[in-house]
Image (spheres, rainbow, N blue to C red):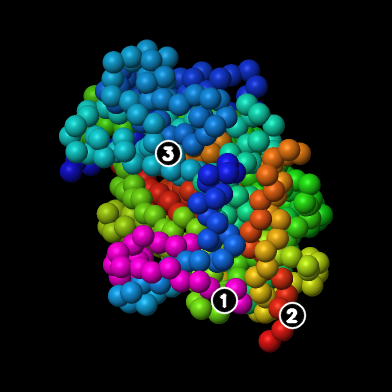
Amino acid sequence: MRQTAIIGIGQTPVREHWDYPIRQLAVQALWAAIKDAGAKHIEGLFVGNMLSGALAEQEHLGALIADYAGFPCIEAVKVEAACASGAAAVRQAVLAVASGHLEIAAAVGVEKLTEFSGKFSGKALATAADADYEASIGLSFAALNALMMQRYMYEYGYSKEDFAPFPVLAHQNAQYNPNAMFRYPITKEQYLKAKPIADPINLLDSSPISDGAAALVIVPLKNIQSFGGSAVKISACEIATDTIGLDNRENPIVLKAAQKSAQAAYKTAGIQPRDISLFEAHDAFSIITALSVEASGFANAGKAPKLAADGVFNINGRLPISTFGGLKGRGHPVGATGVYQLVEAAKQVRGTAPDKLQVDDVRLAMTQNIGGSGATVVTSILEKI
Amino acid sequence: MDIPRYWRLRNQRYRLEGTECIECGQRNFPPRCICPHCKSDSLKSFRFSGRGTVYSFSTIYQALDTFDKDIPYSIALVKLDEGPLITTQLADVGPDEIQIGQPVEMVIRKIYEDGENGPIQYGYKFRPALKE
């Protein structure tokens, strides 16, 4: 297998994009990435998306986006793995280039959740869970996460306010990211008073319904000199799965797929967790940030909220997380999220993050994209060249 | 949920029927075609007793649209006496009365009505145990 690199990145702002259809969002991000790479064409396109069929009555996104991007005859396919669709598409692009099958491939994550009212998108999002045994008996996504959070609080003796540092930090960082959905800070007091969704989860634990697209152009590491773009090495992009139902897990507050994909990523990259300079976590809900940090080996079980309170995850802390605002602050356009994380990690490695968000001396940046209640997890590691 | 799909689930929704592996004895709910533990395809149906304890719980204030009219309602992961966890709604209990570790038992209740003229769908919920 060949080593690969990101040579171009692109993104649209994360918003409620009432003016734009899926194809336009995807093409904007894709062409931004192609121009950033200093390229003119791509040989393959992998589209990460979860809900275009349910919400926009449009499937077959591989062909659609390739067509509208001006590449009507290339290999193009949609990749779906719930909220992990974005990074799962990147994984396919990486494999296509690493295997020698393609010389230049793109991954674009795109999602449009605002085609219908919030209630409808909530129902569509719940299709990532077990339809027969979770969603159809009244469990939303927030409900599944609430079951994890309640048990976690019980086992480790935390109260609701101990989770405040996660959304407070996400908003703190998002305010300096021009592409973020929420560009304002929130306080612990606001967090504690927020509207309940599925107790103990409230509105400010939850990432927002949003639209957006992000894209990467990937080439063999040995060819980066042929492009104008600033290259970032992809040292690992590893995927693992777990039971679809939360109730079928050995321990519902351990993200086994996150453990497996993170361990595989460390092994592929030949590094240890302590070598990582920053971590783009999948903070769809505050509890998932804690579980993800622990599963990745950055904290012992039950310790993540304590580390968050100590400032370990702040921009100038020992392990900055969600440096562009994460899913909570930047927004969570489901199938695009994993690609946004990688675009942001690439900016950190390149040293082109906004001043207040740039982490010093970034050598290795890690991202983790989580689908469902942890049933698909993609962990990626980017390295400075 | 459409009627054929619901009908297919009748033994699970009404009888809590899962599977037991003939090779290794592992019990599963929902039923499996391949044993997740030993990969055997020799499984027989196994009816759970419907008794267990609350492993985790939540009260829902913002629901998927089908369940909107039921809010607030409570849900739980219940540890069945025979081993597996099951995801369920709770019945006959207020949000402040639920505790992790509490004994609960299965009852058949209305899960939802499919619109004004649609069928009413029933299935398991769990309530605080009435007897030892």
Tell which of A209 and B129 is nearer to you. Answer: B129
The residue drawn where x is 42% and y is 25% is: A61
Q: Amino acid at mark 3?
A: Glu
Quarter of the image that includes the N terminus of chain A:
top left
- Can residue A210 be seen here? The reply is yes
**Residue range highlighted in magenta:** B30-52
Which mark lies nearer to you, 2 or 3?
Answer: 2
Tell me if mark 2 has few (under 14), some (14-19) or many (20+) residues whose alpha carbon lies within 10 angstroms of its own.
Answer: few
The residue drawn where x is 50% and y is 51% is: B8
Tell me if mark 1 has few (under 14), some (14-19) or many (20+) residues whose alpha carbon lies within 10 angstroms of its own.
Answer: some
| Left or right of residue A106: residue B46 | right
Label 1 is found on which chain of the structure? B
Tell me if mark 3 has few (under 14), some (14-19) or many (20+) residues whose alpha carbon lies within 10 angstroms of its own.
Answer: some
Tell which of A371 and A121 is nearer to you. Answer: A121
Residue that carries the numbered disc 3 in the rendered image: A80
Position of residue B100 relative to residue B12, above or below, is below
Q: Are marks 2 and 1 on the same chain?
A: yes
> Label 1 near label 2: C-beta < 8 Å?
no
Instruction: Calculate the distance from the C-alpha at mark 1 to the C-alpha at mark 3.
Output: 38 Å
The residue drawn where x is 74% and y is 80% is: B130
Residue that carries the numbered disc 1 in the rendered image: B49
Position of residue A158 relative to residue A280, above or below, is below
Residue that carries the numbered disc 2 in the rendered image: B130
Query: What SS does tag 2 mark?
Result: loop
- Can residue A149 be seen here? The reply is no
Label 2 is found on which chain of the structure? B
**Who comes first in sequence, dot 2 or dot 1?**
1
